[in-house]
Amino acid sequence: MFPGAHHLVFNHSQFIDQQADAGPTGIDTLREAANPDAAHDSSARDPPPQCFPGTREQLIEDTVHWAVPTVGTDDPLPLFWMKGPAGVGKSAVAQTCVGKLKDMGRLGAAFFFAVRTRDKAAQFFPTIIYQLCSEFPDYRDLVDRLIRRDRTILNKTMATQFRVLIVEPLQELERKGKGIGKRIAIFIDGLDECESANAQCEIIRIIATAARDGTTPFCWAFFSRPEAHIEGTFAIPDIIRITATSVLPVSHDADGDIELYLRSSFENILRRRNISLMSQWPSDDDIRTLVHAANGLFVYVATAVRRITT
C-alpha cells in the first residue's frame, strides 16, 4: 500500500477497502445488454412513424383510454393487442400513443422491434428494465444492487430475468410502501419482427402470466401482424380473457384520413418551395387516384410523399 515507506505508525486509523465498488455498476451492465435503438425516442428511428394530426383520432383515443382509464370507470383489461397487416399504420398509432402517454407521465417503457435487424429476444427485457429504471429511481436502486450481486442474471432465461428484475423488486418496493401506485403502460411494437416465433410467443406468455396474477402494476400493449403463432398464443384461454383486441384491417374506411394526409403534405411541399397554394398541383383527380391506389394502406402514400419531397 505504501511502497518504499519505513517506520510508519498509524494511531486510531481506519482503512476502507473501496475495491468492492470498482468496475461498472449494475445499471452499466444492464445498459450494455439493452438495445437503445428500440426506444421510442431513439435517434436510430428518427423520424419515427407518427399519425398525421387529425387522422386515426378515435383509434388513438381508445388506445390511450385503455392505458389510462377515466376516473370512476372499471379498470380495463391488462393486455391490449392491435393486429393488422403490414402498412396499415400500426407503428404510427403505437408511436403516437406512446408520445401522449409519456406526456401524461403514464409510460413505463416502449420497445419498437425493427424490420431491418430482426431484434434479438435476449435484448428485450433488459431494454424494458433499463427504461423502467430511468423512470423509477427506487426501482433503479434495487435493480442495480441485484445485478451487482449476480452479473450473470442478464444471461439467464427471459422468464428468470422477468421474475428477478421486474416482479421481485416491484414486490419489495410495495412491501416498503414505495410502490409505483398507478397504472403504467408498456408498449411493444412489431413483435412479429423479433428473431424467432418461439421467442415471440414466450414474451407474450411471460407477460400474460404476470398480468393474470397481478404481480406488476403494468398494462402491456402489443402491436403486430396477425401471424398464426401469435394468434394462437393470444387465443390461449388464460390469455384471451385478459386481452383487449383491436383489429386494424386494410380498409377503405381509412380513405378520408389518407386524403387529409395527402392534401396537407402537398400543401407543405408548396409552402417550402414558395409556390402559391392556389396552384392546381396536384389536381383533385391526382389526389383521388393516389387515395384509390393506396387501398387503405398509409405506408403507400407516406412513401409516395417522401419520394416527392426528396
Image (cartoon, rainbow, N blue to C red):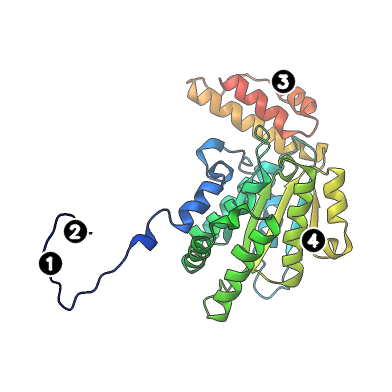
Q: Nearer the viewer, mark 4 or mark 3?
A: 4
Give the residue type that dot 4 points to.
Thr
Mark 3 / mark 1, whichever is N-terminal = 1
Q: Nearer the viewer, mark 4 or mark 1?
A: 1
Q: Earlier in the sequence, mark 4 or mark 1?
A: 1
Residue 8's mark? 1
| Mark in the foreground, 3 or 1 | 1
Q: Amino acid at mark 3?
A: Asp
Question: Could you tell me how far apart the alpha carbons at marks 4 and 2 are, in whole angstroms?
Answer: 65 Å
Q: Are marks 3 and 1 in contact (CB under 8 Å)?
A: no
Say which residue label 2 marks.
Answer: 2
Which of pointers 4 and 3 lies earlier in the amino acid sequence? 4
Type of the residue with mark 2? Phe
Q: Quadrant of the N terminus?
A: bottom left
Q: Earlier in the sequence, mark 2 or mark 3?
A: 2
Question: Which quarter of the figure has residue 11?
Answer: bottom left
Q: CA distance from mark 2 to mark 3?
A: 83 Å
Q: Nearer the viewer, mark 2 or mark 3?
A: 2
Q: In front: 1, or 301?
A: 1
Closer to viewer: mark 4 or mark 2: 2
Residue, disc 3:
286
| Mark 4 Cα shell of 10 Å, populated few (<14), some (14-19), many (≥20) | many
Q: Position of residue 54 (x, y in %)?
A: 64, 44
Whether pointer 4 and pointer 2 mark residues with C-beta atoms closer than 8 Å, the reply is: no
